[in-house]
Image: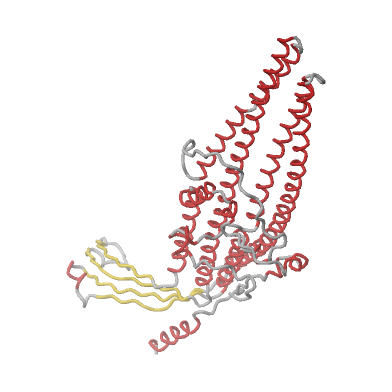
């Protein structure tokens, strides 16, 4: 009868395995996260590939540096370790679904005094040795899905760690590109200043010659000298800024400062721009949004794990031990002691601990959803801001180009009139300084336009996926597939 009862309990437990309590996770659809007005504006927008956006800038050295950073960056190495740690945590949680078996071996000596009373030991006045060798096994039957929910949460956390790696890749590509653009603009600025220095040197020689011939004044010579020295003084800080940018690049690449030396080259092209209206699915491919969605999935699964603590916990345990007073008894099959059977634990009074854990898990799920919604709005703002600022920067660069042309004409006219003796050298100096300021400002405007273009690609999640440089840690973590935002079931 007892055997039948135990068999019935085990059968009932087996039947109930897989009945998970708590909410089943459903991914939010894009319509739930992106405002209707924005969805309508981007519904017919063409698909935009921003995976390897840096290739479109047509700067080979920039592309090489980004690819090097993907391989050697310490930031990415740290993110990969978080994937490995998340996988290990998943293994820890998953182990609770399987039976646990431990071996044991022991020796003990028990003794009871002549007047002693020992119900668990030898009779009074006797002593015995006890040798034992055995196996102990236990298995918690996951009736209500507590452990399976924890495994589900661990799976989501692996995905979140992978998205964290991708987010680091997106940020790293953008940072490398920004430093290269900064260096390119500094080189162009330095070239402009050197050209101006040559012109200033010629003007100084002209002023000096005119003064020596009696056609000019020492004031003109002093003004020319001041203009020449002022332009020369602009070069040292530019050289320092350039070297500092190379130091920052080396750190991004995981190298020691001073190990990177960037060659001179023109500014990258900036005329390949994603369409102003981008599909919502492209925006929702951003790693930070995908990671936040995975955090929401993990938080939802943990609600079920917390609720499962309300229900009885069933464990199947057993042990078989060979034991006796002689060492040979530890290997004697007839000297066995067997204990096996189920254990049911029912929470009766726990001071509100379980209820509080459920409330905590539900609050964390709501917070995760709010964070995801907030990140979506932030992403929309970043896309619109980057697009708007890029357009304004391009407009500013175009206007400065026209102003530069007019300033160059004014400088030539002033120099011709000075050579003819119609104006003094102050007019030439002012015209030249004005032209230099406009040229340098245009360089800054073009640099700003490039930086805003990089911001736009980054806001769209550009660079989040590159199968050619995927590491073993990333590839093993999870299958690399676009997030099915419009799917309703896990």
Residue at horizontal 75%, vertical 64%? 38
* In front of the other: 246 or 368: 246
Q: Give residue 441's quadrant in the image.
A: top right
Q: Please give left or right for residue 415 compared with residue 245 in the image.
A: right
Q: Is residue 9 above or below residue 245?
A: below
Q: Please give left or right for residue 433 compared with residue 471 in the image.
A: right
Residue at horizontal 75%, vertical 45%? 398
> Is residue 351 visible in the rendered structure shown here?
no
- Rendering colour mode: secondary structure
Residue 459's spot in the image, x, y percent? 65, 55
* In front of the other: 237 or 218: 218
Residue 364's spot in the image, x, y percent? 63, 62
Q: Is residue 445 above or below residue 144?
A: above
Q: Please give left or right for residue 112 compared with residue 150 in the image.
A: left
Q: Give residue 190's quadrant in the image.
A: top right
Residue 121's spot in the image, x, y percent? 29, 66
Where does the C terminus fall, quadrant-wise? bottom right
Residue 427's spot in the image, x, y percent? 79, 23
Q: Residue furthest right?
A: 422
* In front of the other: 17 or 297: 297
Q: Give residue 366's quadrant in the image.
A: bottom right
Q: Please give left or right for residue 167 compared with residue 328 in the image.
A: right
Q: Is residue 80 above or below residue 225?
A: below
> Is residue 278 visible in the rendered structure shown here?
yes
Where does the N terminus fall, quadrant-wise? bottom left
Q: Is residue 430 above or below residue 468?
A: above
């Amino acid at each position: 009868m007892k055997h039948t009862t135990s068999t019935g309990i085990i059968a009932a437990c087996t039947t109930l395995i897989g009945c998970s309590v708590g909410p089943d996770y459903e991914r939010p659809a894009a319509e739930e996260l992106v405002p209707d007005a924005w969805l309508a504006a981007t519904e017919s927008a063409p698909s935009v590939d921003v995976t390897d956006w840096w290739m479109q800038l047509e700067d080979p050295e920039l592309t090489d540096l980004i690819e090097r950073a993907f391989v050697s960056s310490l930031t990415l190495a740290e993110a990969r370790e978080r994937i490995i740690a998340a996988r290990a945590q998943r293994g820890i949680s998953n182990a609770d679904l399987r039976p646990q078996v431990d071996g044991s071996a022991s020796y003990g000596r028990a003794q009871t005094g002549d007047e002693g009373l020992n119900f668990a030991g030898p009779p009074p006045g006797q002593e015995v040795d006890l040798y034992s060798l055995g196996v102990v096994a236990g298995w918690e039957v996951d009736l209500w899905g507590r452990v399976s929910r924890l495994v589900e949460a661990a799976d989501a956390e692996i995905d979140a760690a992978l998205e964290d790696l991708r987010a680091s890749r997106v940020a790293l590509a953008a940072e490398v590109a920004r430093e290269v653009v900064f260096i390119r603009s500094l080189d162009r600025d330095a070239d402009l200043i050197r050209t101006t220095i040559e012109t200033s040197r010629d003007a100084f020689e002209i002023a000096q010659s005119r003064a020596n011939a009696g056609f000019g004044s020492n004031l003109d010579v002093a003004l020319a000298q001041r203009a020449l020295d002022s332009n020369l003084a602009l070069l040292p800080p530019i050289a320092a800024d350039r070297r500092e940018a190379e130091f920052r690049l080396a750190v991004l690449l995981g190298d020691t400062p001073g190990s990177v030396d960037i060659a001179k080259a023109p500014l990258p092209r900036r005329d390949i721009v994603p369409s102003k209206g981008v599909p919502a699915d492209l925006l929702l491919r951003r790693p930070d949004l995908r990671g936040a969605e995975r955090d929401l999935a993990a938080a939802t699964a943990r609600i079920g794990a917390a609720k499962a603590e309300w229900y009885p916990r069933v464990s199947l345990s057993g042990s078989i031990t060979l034991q006796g007073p002689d060492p040979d008894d530890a290997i004697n099959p007839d000297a066995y002691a067997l204990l096996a059977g189920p254990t049911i634990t029912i929470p009766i009074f726990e001071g509100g601990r379980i209820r509080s854990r459920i409330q905590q898990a539900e609050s964390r799920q709501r917070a995760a959803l709010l964070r995801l919604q907030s990140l979506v709005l932030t992403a929309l703002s970043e896309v619109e801001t980057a697009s708007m600022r890029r357009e304004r920067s391009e407009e500013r660069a175009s206007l400065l180009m026209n102003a530069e042309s007019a300033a160059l004409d004014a400088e030539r006219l002033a120099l011709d009139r000075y050579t003819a003796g119609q104006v003094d050298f102050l007019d030439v100096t002012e015209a030249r300084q004005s032209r230099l300021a406009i040229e340098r400002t245009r360089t800054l405007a073009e640099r700003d336009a490039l930086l805003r273009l990089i911001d736009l690609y980054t806001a769209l999640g550009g660079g989040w996926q590159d199968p050619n440089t995927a590491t073993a840690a990333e590839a093993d973590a999870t299958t690399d597939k676009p997030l099915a935002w419009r799917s309703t079931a896990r």
